[in-house]
Amino acid sequence: GSGLAGTRNDLKSDDRLRVATTVAPITSILLQVGGDRIYLHGLIPPGIDSHTYEPKPSDAVILGRADIFIMNGASLEGSTEAIARSNLKDPSKIYKLADNTLSGDDPATGFLYDFSFPRAEGKPNPHLWMNPLYALRYAELIRDWLSENDAPNASYYAANYDAFKVVIDQLNAAIEKDSQTVPPESRKLLTYHDSWAYWARLYGYTVIGAAQPSDFKEPSAKEVADLIQQVRDEKVP
């Protein structure tokens, strides 16, 4: 089995490491590395806006049973960290992926701010994992944190990380190759959610706008009209 805990509060009573996490992309990377040696529960369901997610009472129960909590950080998860702090058996076992991947706000190497995540609000664009090399860094951190808390399975986590790295390296090479088929002046993206900033930086694209910038509301008629005009003005292919 995958070791994925069900929607009920059923983190089992055997000796597997109990891991709580937040959003689906991180849950996915954790499954790749942790495999069947961990029990895993993602608190934030797919399709729910993590930025405004309000933790439920059942989340406190899950966190109370978890050994460790792995989150994205960079202000992605709203108030989820606070409930983890007050319910986790050991509050020092809160691990943040983004904060251990980037630091500072150098536009070339650090956290990015943009139209959805303005610098004035102090919360950077948190979607690091869309950049395959940062997703690999997430997997590396997860490998190390799982091994630190479950030393007997360290070699298993290392082997799973190595297999994940092969796939990520292939993906990165394929995107780089495909990007060469797009003329530099045409490397402009209009996205749905504003989650492509770090992907764009890696492969030399510019994100010119998002249909649904930072929350999960539908864009208004005016916003759609403005985006259409922007696409025309900037000649996005």
Image (cartoon, rainbow, N blue to C red):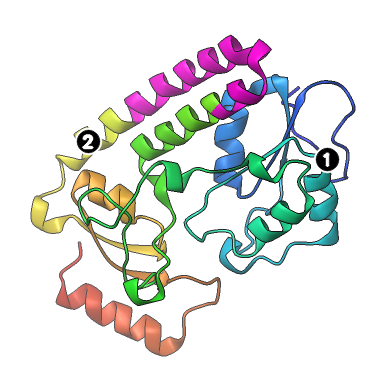
- Quarter of the image for residue 129 reads top left
Q: Nearer the viewer, residue 29 or 221?
A: 29
* Mark 2 and mark 1: Cα distance apart in space: 43 Å
* Extreme-bottom residue of the structure: 222
Which amino acid, mark 2?
Answer: Glu
Q: Which residue is mark 1?
A: 65
Of the two numbered discs 2 and 1 in the rendering, the one whose residue sits closer to the viewer = 1
Q: Nearer the viewer, residue 88 or 42?
A: 88
Q: Nearer the viewer, residue 94 or 137?
A: 94
Which amino acid, mark 1?
Answer: Arg
Number of numbered labels in the structure image: 2
Q: Which residue is mark 2?
A: 176
Question: Is residue 133 one of those drawn in magenta?
Answer: no
Q: Secondary structure at mark 1?
A: helix
Tell me if mark 1 has few (under 14), some (14-19) or many (20+) residues whose alpha carbon lies within 10 angstroms of its own. Answer: some
Q: Does residue 51 appear to the left or right of 231 in the view shown?
A: right
Q: Position of residue 216 (x, y in %)?
A: 55, 71
Q: Does residue 83 appear to the left or right of 161 in the view shown?
A: right
Q: Which residues are magenta?
A: 145-171
| 220 is higher (above) or lower (below) than 150 | below
